Amino acid sequence: MSHTPFIFGAYAIGVVVLLWCAVAPVIRKKAVLRDIRRIIQVEERSRDANP
Amino acid sequence: MTKETSIKKPRKNPLVLFIHKLGSPAYFYRFSGMFIPWFWAIFLVLTAIGMYQAFFVVPADYQQGESFRILYLHVPAAWMSMLAYIVMAVMAFISLVWRIRITEILAICSAPVGAAFTIVTLAAGSLWGRPTWGTYWVWDARLTSELVLLFLYLGVIGLYNSIDEPRKAARAASLLALVGAVNLPIIHYSVKWWNTLHQGSSISLLGGSSIDSSMLWPLLIMSIAVKFFFGANLLTRARVKLLEQDKRKAWVREFVKEGR
């Protein structure tokens, strides 16, 4: 039995899972920062409209 | 000088002061941000060294053949899956006793990282088991208790997400994390308490290790590398969670306006 598919399979799963684990918070951070910038813009606009 | 002002206030321990400072979200955000790039860099360097050794330097095992190279992923991931739970349980305990919000966040952010390492442990172990044992899975004590660990992580994540108010959610999840800590000694001692297909410990901190040092060093390097992965990932997640929870607070707006 060749062990190569098992070795590459294990490392491929490891890379995919850990890569997703590392990238997920970065994607989330971008979304949160976009949300915060939008809140700031809305507040600044409403402040300008009602000085 | 009045009598009151002449009495010297007791000086606080610098470590206690530092811990108090870390409790401030703005300070924690700034302070933790300094470590993340270093942690990633150390992780990448150590992984490159460890993987090179594991694939190109270490000889094949005389019994397991080439498949034993999977252990350079499986074993560090397995140790990390348990250590992540210890971190989560300690943070959960601190957050339940002292109600520190940063530790609540660190506890809840440990769960997805720990779950990821548990998935890697189970998958890599399963793929190692097929050529070595002749089967992908058996319901032996070590494998089953590791699977329970994954369910505990998923339970903590699920419970936290099911409650809208973040602090109540963190307290409930912390309680579950603490209760689940009973599984850790079961995982560790399962190979001693029961007759399992999974082998016993080959590496001991105090006693001698039963594997050759040429095979041991890459394993230790990879084990240290994943600690830095965990540290970097945990801090990144904690910072995002802080931003998310405090998005209407002044310190977050200052950070966003500064473009950090």
Image (cartoon, coloured by chain):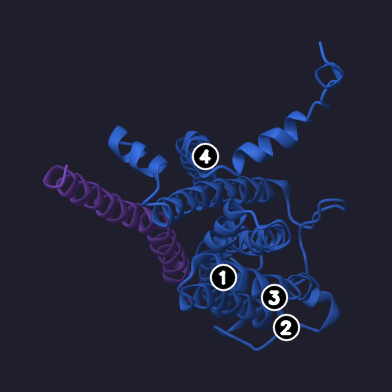
Q: Which residue corresponds to mark 4?
A: B32
Look at the picture and state if B115 lies above or below B31. Answer: below
Query: Callout 4: helix, strand or loop?
Result: helix
Distance from disc 2 to disc 4, alpha carbons, whole Å, reads 38 Å
Amino acid type at image mark 1 = Lys
- In the picture of the structure, the residue carrying the numbered disc 2 is B141
Q: How crowded is mark 3: few (under 14 residues within 10 Å), some or many (20 or more)?
A: some
Question: Considering only vertical position in the picture, is B198 above or below A51?
Answer: below
Display colour for chain B: blue
**2 or 3: mark nearer the eye:** 3
Chain identity of mark 1: B
Residue type of the residue flagged with mark 4 = Ser
Is B62 or B21 nearer to us in this picture? B21
Chain to which the residue tagged by mark 2 belongs: B
Label 1, label 3: how far apart the Cα atoms are: 19 Å
Front label number (1 vs 3): 1
Question: Between disc 4 and disc 1, whose residue precedes?
Answer: 4
Looking at the rendered structure, which numbered label has been put on residue B168?
1
- Where residue A17 sits, quadrant-wise, is bottom left
> Which of disc 3 and disc 1 is earlier in sequence?
1
Q: Which of marks 2 and 3 is nearer the N terminus?
A: 2
Quarter of the picture containing the N terminus of chain B is top right
Instruction: Tell me the quadrant of the picture where the C terminus of chain B can be found.
Output: top left
Left or right relative to B56: residue B146:
right
Counting residues from the N terminus, which is met first, the one under dot 4 or under dot 3? 4
Q: What residue type is labelled 2?
A: Ala
Amino acid marked by disc 3: Gly
Q: Position of residue B72 (x, y in %)?
A: 58, 57
Counting other residues with Cα less than 10 Å from the Cα at mark 4, is it few (<14), some (14-19), or many (20 or more)? some
Q: Is residue B42 visible?
A: yes
